[in-house]
Amino acid sequence: MNSNTNEMTIKDLLKLVWESKWLILLCTLIFGIGGVLFVESVKPVYKVDALVQLEVAKDSKALNPLGAMADMFNVASPAETEIEVIKSRMVLGRVVEKLHLNVVVTPLGHGPWERLNKIPRPILQVERFDVPEGSQGRGYFVKVLAKNQLVISDEFQQQVGRFNAGEQVDSSLNMAHIGIFVSKVNALEGQVFKVRRLELSEAIGSLRNDLNVAEVGKKTGIIGLALEGFDPVLASKILNEIANAYLTQNVERRSAEAQKTLEFLDGQLPQIKASMEMAENRLNRYRLQVGSIDLTEEAKIALGQQVEVRQALFNAQQKRKEAMQLFKEDHPNVRTQDSIVKAIESQMQTRDHSVYKLPLQQQQIVRLMRDVQVGTELYTTLLNNAQQLRIVKAGEIGNVRIVDYALPKKTPITPIKPLTETIAVLFGLFLGIAIAVVRRFMRSGIEDHRIIDKELGLPTYASIPHSKEQDMLQNKVRRREIGVHLLAITHQDDLTIEAFRSLRTTLNFSMMDAANRILMIAGPSPSIGKSFVSANFAAVLAQTGKNILLIDGDMRRGHLQQYFGLKRNMGLSDVLTERAILERTIVSTGVQGLSLMTTGTVPPNPSELLLHSNFSLMLECLIPMFDYIVIDAPPVLAVTDALIIGKLSGTTLMILKHGQHPFGEIQLCAERFTHAGVVVKGVVMNDVAENSLGDEKYHYGYRYGKQG
Amino acid sequence: MDAPESILLVCVGNICRSPMAEAFLQKRLPHVKVSSAGLAALVGDGADPGAISAMAQLKMDISSHQARQVDAAMLAEAHLVFVMSLAQKSALEKKYPWVRGRVFRLGEWDRFDIDDPVGLSPEAYVRARCLIEQGCDSWTAKLRTYE
């Protein structure tokens, strides 16, 4: 780890990932399982779609019996307009009412857990649910008592009434004025459903939210309808209903214009019929009065001309009236009709004059017969027109075609199970790595001894590798098994012990000038392996045939005796409080040349005891008795004991756990020693991790050529 | 302190500097097992001719030397390990963290590195030989104080 530059290379990252593989694996696993649980428990959403085509009604001309007249009935709307129509309350309102979408039924107690266990959703099919005005939106509760036996209560759990499935409950029959009809129940006894009657606008609004209408492509005239919902069958039913409702309104709108004209014609018909009958009656009466009269040729011609011109006039007037239905008075269409009417009127006057040349009787009969003929012709024409319009209306198919009806789909759009699960796993993986990286930077424990050397001037005397055997020994220590549980004894060939031997070699040189042969093993914080180093180093020292005394200086939490399978008994504190004589507190450890002084009885005031002259006196007595005295001191940052012991020790070593201490902690520890006047000789880096990814190969510039 | 029982000399190729140092140190400490090895040894090669002739000037023969690659077992067996430069020390300590403490520069007491003379002039060999001899003398003096 190149902590110097604070940069992380790919190699560092890979190493970090390898070191934190369990954390990352755990994280990935948690998120993977979480992802699976999520997709299994979440309510799946299904999407159904339908296609509607807007036809530009060119081809309908051919089918239309009115030909060019049909142009008047064509309403070509662009897709945007039609999309808004589909989303309108007019269309959606019909669907809501037809499919009872304003009644919302929710089974209570059917949540993610039930979905996860694949428990089918309880069903209560409510066909009708009427509530009093103002109670829309309130929640009512329907409870299943037994098969098909239901009880309904209001929002305050006040029972309203009992009823059966399949039974019509009329709103006038109960005090709460609730009408309900349940067609189907599929639920266990005791299942409660919440039933709400929505306001129409609210129901339409929620339907509109789930509905997506858009033109497929650009200017294709094809509109795609898509609906999302929890029930694919219901969703497709709703969507098809929407398509149908839209189709119906389209047809209605187009036939509406024909309908209007028809209504006008129908209004005219009785009037025309009445005047025709009146004219017939007048002719009949005149004939009875004067007897039968034959028309002269001249009169016949005059009659024909008069009928013809009147018919033309009526037709012109009729056309004008029709035009007036669609246009204003000053519209060119109306004006043209106006001028036609005027021309025919003046023509009619000249024709009428020609009749005056006939004899009086002939004149009278021509006038009467003319009225009858004109009336009859008009009536027939109008009747024909009305019939034709009825045909147009009946033949109206609208300019909308439903291309695809919605089909229920089996696969939900959300959650997409494999995708969501993959994302969850990847996210877990990423998070695991992120946590590992953050933890590394948070901890930012010093791993590079060069920093300590450079910043604090403390050389690293030895690097003690992590030992797997020690983990096993530590268990024996913890279980307080009898026997020596020292790596230096049980695994003499372990590289960890070789590291202690290296430490021994270097200390040989550095302790040469020391004031005495007392070596204090100290460190900033607890649980960094001070006791492990003290005990093993003492044993390694003893292996050179020297007489070593190991003193457990941590009178608070010391436990060195456990490494040797010994009991605490009398020890340091008892010597200092003069409760025991020195010789009785020194016990042999079972390791040749190594004696131990335990902490002794745990005292209330360890620091004061150490400050007492008894401590220095004791050390003075011990120095001649042993070649080396190794003292295991309590943590420096916790208590001052180490500083007191340090003053009396010839040599002080600072134990650091590899990568465990932030720089500030090491610095503080070093400062404490300096302030107390204790010179720290060097650092022992404990628990140096094995370089699992392999260390750099030796890159030292090798300049030898193959010379012969 | 006890006199070390075995000393290992380490340079890069184990054909020039460390064989010379081995010869000097063995002569001064006859009861100590002195051996040498290389960090990137030309395994099996004999000593460099330049080194042989430089040593021959002092009537010392290192022609029978054979280069070997340093390994953990050698390092574990040696009580002291001498290298020629600080770079070699840190390279060794990086590869075998546990050797930290028993590895020293040969020129540690006078704080000098001994550069590789291979391929250079005979004078360079003699200069290196002198430095090696100086280092061996200092260390021998140091080690004798413990006896």
Image (tube, grey):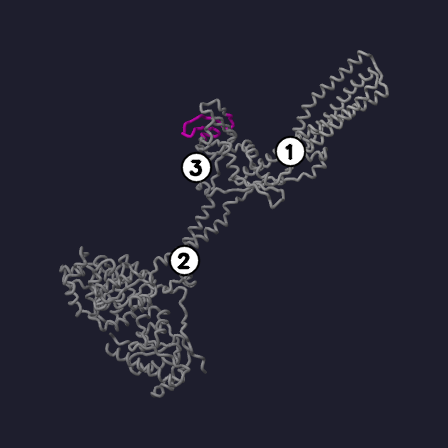
Using residue A363 as the reference point, say whether residue A533 is left or right of it: left
Residue A229 point in image, percent of width and height: 52, 40
Residue marked by disc 3? A109
Where A343 sits versus B72, above or below? above
Residue A207 point in image, percent of width and height: 52, 37
Tags 2 and 3 both on a single chain: yes
Tags 2 and 1 both on a single chain: yes
| Magenta run includes residue A393 | no
Quadrant the C terminus of chain A occupies: bottom left
Which kind of residue does numbered mark 1 sit on? Arg
The residue carrying pointer 1 sits among few (fewer than 14), some (14 to 19) or many (20 or more) residues within 10 Å by Cα, namely some
Name the residue nearer the viewer: A157 or A592.
A157
Residue marked by disc 1? A254
| Magenta run includes residue A155 | yes
The label on residue A21 is 2
Which kind of residue does numbered mark 3 sit on? Gly
Give the alpha-carbon distance from disc 2 to disc 1, as whole Å. 71 Å
Residue A31 point in image, percent of width and height: 43, 50
Q: Residue furthest right?
A: A297
Which kind of residue does numbered mark 2 sit on? Lys
Residue A356 point in image, percent of width and height: 81, 19
Q: Secondary structure at mark 1?
A: helix
Is tag 2's residue or tag 3's residue first in the polypeptide sequence? 2
Chain hosting mark 2: A
The residue carrying pointer 3 sits among few (fewer than 14), some (14 to 19) or many (20 or more) residues within 10 Å by Cα, namely few
Q: Magenta stretch mostly in which secondary structure?
A: strand
Residue A432's image quarter? bottom left
Is tag 1's residue or tag 3's residue first in the polypeptide sequence? 3
